[in-house]
Amino acid sequence: AAAAAAAAAAPLFPSAPSAPAAPSGRNATALPAAPQHKPQQPPASRPAAPPRPPSPAEREMERWCVICNDDAVLWCNDCDGDAYCRRCFREGHRDEDMRAHKTVPIRR
């Protein structure tokens, strides 16, 4: 019975720190003082810059075939608007499910 009482009194995790001692004296039940300063304000975030317009070179690259980089003649709406030259579109859209893709001609 004494061994069981000693085991119950022993801490479950002996390496864990023990509980801090209870405060004593006149302010034993008082809460810590409230801060006397204002909290710092986070720096104001700058609004995101508007996207810059594409350069002429970037606009020209949008009109290159996504497969061979030749001049594209159409955009395929069902292929996320990818640009294709005639040959690559014809070769890449041979399957039955690809033949019904809607396209938009590229005007130069």
Image: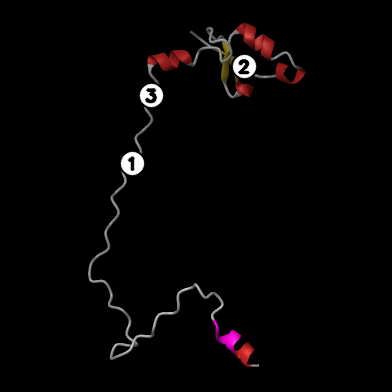
Vertical comparison of 47 with 78: above or below: below
- How would you rate the neighbour count of disc 3 (Cα within 10 Å): few for under 14, some for 14-19, many for 20 or more? few
Q: Is residue 60 left or right of residue 10?
A: left
Q: Where, by quadrant of the figure, is residue 54 drawn?
A: top left
Instruction: State which tag comes first along the sequence, 3 or 2.
Output: 3
Return the x and y of residue 1 as percentages of the image width and height: 65, 93
Q: Is residue 38 left or right of residue 82?
A: left
Q: Is residue 11 left or right of residue 94?
A: left
Vertical comparison of 93 with 27: above or below: above
Return the x and y of residue 106 as percentages of the image width and height: 53, 12
> In what element is the residue under mark 2?
strand
Query: How many marks are shown on the rendered structure?
Result: 3
Return the x and y of residue 36 as percentages of the image width and height: 23, 71
Hey, what amino acid is under mark 2? Answer: Thr
Q: Residue placed at 42% from the left, 17% from the top? A: 58
Q: Residue placed at 64% from the left, 88% from the top? A: 4
For mark 2, what is the residue?
103
Q: Residue furthest right?
A: 96
Q: Residue furthest front?
A: 3
Return the x and y of residue 30 as percentages of the image width and height: 32, 85
Assess whether residue 7 is covered by the magenta stretch. yes
For mark 3, what is the residue?
53
Q: Where, by quadrant of the figure, is residue 24 drawn?
A: bottom left
Assess whether residue 47 is covered by the magenta stretch. no
For mark 1, what is the residue?
47
Colour scheme employed for the rendering of this structure: secondary structure
